[in-house]
Image (tube, rainbow, N blue to C red):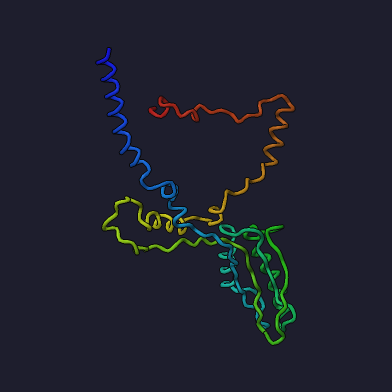
């Protein structure tokens, strides 16, 4: 009995001795280093920016040129991809070309209709222009977001000797820079997007079928089962 107790105590001593260096390795970087990831070390700043298109409107201009229409359509496509809020159309007021600008705004409205931008998506206004500015432009603008990553290349610390085995200061910086360059809309880095409004037509149809006592769910197709047997066939 005494021999068994001695063996048990010996085993516990060995396990305790082994656990000391293991626990030391688990926390050798400290709590702060363990929580310090690439997102915290190399943050991406997301700021709002005004995208502006100045459309020339001299007094002798009769209508929008082909180049003007191409610029407008490219600008409207950029608004659909990155724009937030409404797109603003501002014509000059008080300048010698005021009437010309107002006439061109009506053509810009047609280009907006072609781009399917109507209603609350577009806002119209005016700005005070100088009497001496005979070619005050029409200002078309919207708000977008721009991602600016942290600069990389900080090698101020020598890593020839690193007994603490801590991560380098540049670790994860390249990945953060790539993310800032590749993200389609930097506003997504600020938070999730709002949900789209539900389809009123679909809701009306489902409620109508339910009221008539018919099946309101989507019809099931056996080809949607994705079974192994179907794939093999």
Name of the residue lying farthest toward the left = 3
Q: Is residue 160 left or right of residue 139?
A: left
| Viewer-closest of 34 and 121 | 34
| Tally of numbered tags | 0
Q: Residue at x 37, y 58 (%)?
A: 170
Q: Quick check: 104 above or below 193?
A: below
Image quarter where the N terminus lies is top left
Q: Where residue 218 sits in the image (x, y, percent)?
A: 60, 31
- Residue beneath the point at 26% across and 20% down: 7
Q: Residue furthest top?
A: 1
Residue plotted at (49% across, 55% down): 183
* x and y percentages locating residue 27 in the rendered image: 38, 43
Quadrant of the rendering where the C terminus is positioned: top left
Q: Position of residue 25 (x, y in %)?
A: 33, 42
Tell me if residue 79 comes above or below residue 91 in the rendering.
above
Question: Is 203 in front, or is 63?
Answer: 203
Q: Is residue 119 left or right of residue 188?
A: right
Which quadrant of the structure image shows residue 118? bottom right
Q: Taking 98 as reference, is 70 above or below it?
A: above
Residue found at the very far bottom of the displayed protein: 132
Residue in the foreground of this view, choosing between 127 and 37 = 37
Asked which quadrant contains residue 177, the reply is bottom left
């Amino acid at each position: 009995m005494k021999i068994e107790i001695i063996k048990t105590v010996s085993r516990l001593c060995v396990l305790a001795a082994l656990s000391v260096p293991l626990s030391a390795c688990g926390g050798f970087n400290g709590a702060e280093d363990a929580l310090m990831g690439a997102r915290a070390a190399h943050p991406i700043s997301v700021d709002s920016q005004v995208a502006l298109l100045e459309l020339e409107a001299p007094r002798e201009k009769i209508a929008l040129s082909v180049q003007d229409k191409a610029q407008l359509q490219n600008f409207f496509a950029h608004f659909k991809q990155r724009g937030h809020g409404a797109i603003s159309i501002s014509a000059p007021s008080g300048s010698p070309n005021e009437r010309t600008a107002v006439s061109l705004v009506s053509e810009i409205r047609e280009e907006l209709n072609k781009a399917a931008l109507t209603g609350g998506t577009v806002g119209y206004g005016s700005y005070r222009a100088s009497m001496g500015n005979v070619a005050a432009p029409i200002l078309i603008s919207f708000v977008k977001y721009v991602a600016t990553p942290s600069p990389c290349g900080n090698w101020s610390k020598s890593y020839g000797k690193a007994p603490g085995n801590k991560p380098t200061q540049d670790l994860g910086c390249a990945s953060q820079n790539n993310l800032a360059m590749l993200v389609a809309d930097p506003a997504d880095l600020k938070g999730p997007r709002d949900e789209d409004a539900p389809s009123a037509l679909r809701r009306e149809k489902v409620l109508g079928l339910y009221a008539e006592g018919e099946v309101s769910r989507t019809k099931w197709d056996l080809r949607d089962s994705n079974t192994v047997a179907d794939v093999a066939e």
